[in-house]
Image (tube, helix red, strand yellow):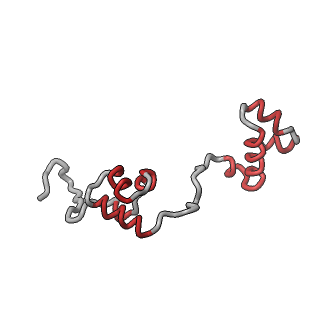
Amino acid sequence: MKNTTAQSVRASSVAETMRVCAKTVRKRIARFEAEGAAGLRDRSSRPHTLHRPTPAATVAAIECLRRQRFTGQQIARDLGVSPATVSRPVPLQLATAPHGHQRQDTDQPSRIIR
């Protein structure tokens, strides 16, 4: 990329050589000029924020139904939301063990702890 910017080669000829579109080449050159080599690393295309975040009441209802072991399809149908809304990553407090159960690590993994 550095040689490309220094030689002022047309983005379309570089794109043809690299088998990508010219828009991608221009975007990568701009990132390199702005951020250096770090700008060329792969990055997620996922947006940093949602345009229309799920309302807090809906999130709370999803969490409640998940704790009751409803499936994603059941929750989506009952709440009238898409399955994608239900399947979004759960908050950290839901990633823990169900209520009343606590994980216990031991130096004897085969031993059952009661």
Which image quadrant is residue 58 in? bottom left
Residue appearing at x 18%, y 51% in the figure: 108
Q: Residue at x 34, y 59 (%)?
A: 95
In percent of the image, x 37 and y 67: which residue is there? 60
Identify the residue at horizontal 32%, vertical 52% (top origin): 74
Considering only vertical position in the picture, is 103 above or below 57? above
Q: Residue furthest left?
A: 114
Residue 31 on image: x %, y %: 73, 51
Q: Nearer the viewer, residue 76 or 13?
A: 76
Q: How many marks?
A: 0
Instruction: Say above or below: 67 vs 40.
Output: below
Q: Position of residue 7 (x, y in %)?
A: 88, 40
Relative image position of residue 66 (x, y in whole percent): 31, 58
Q: Is residue 46 left or right of residue 99?
A: right
- Outermost residue to the right: 8
Query: Could you tell me residue 67's position as x and y percent?
Result: 28, 61
Instruction: State the quadrant of the N terminus.
Output: top right
- In this rendered view, identify the residue nearer to me: 95 or 3: 95
Q: Quadrant of the C terminus?
A: bottom left
- Dividing the picture into quarters, in which one does residue 75 lie? bottom left
Specify whether 58 is left or right of 42.
Answer: left
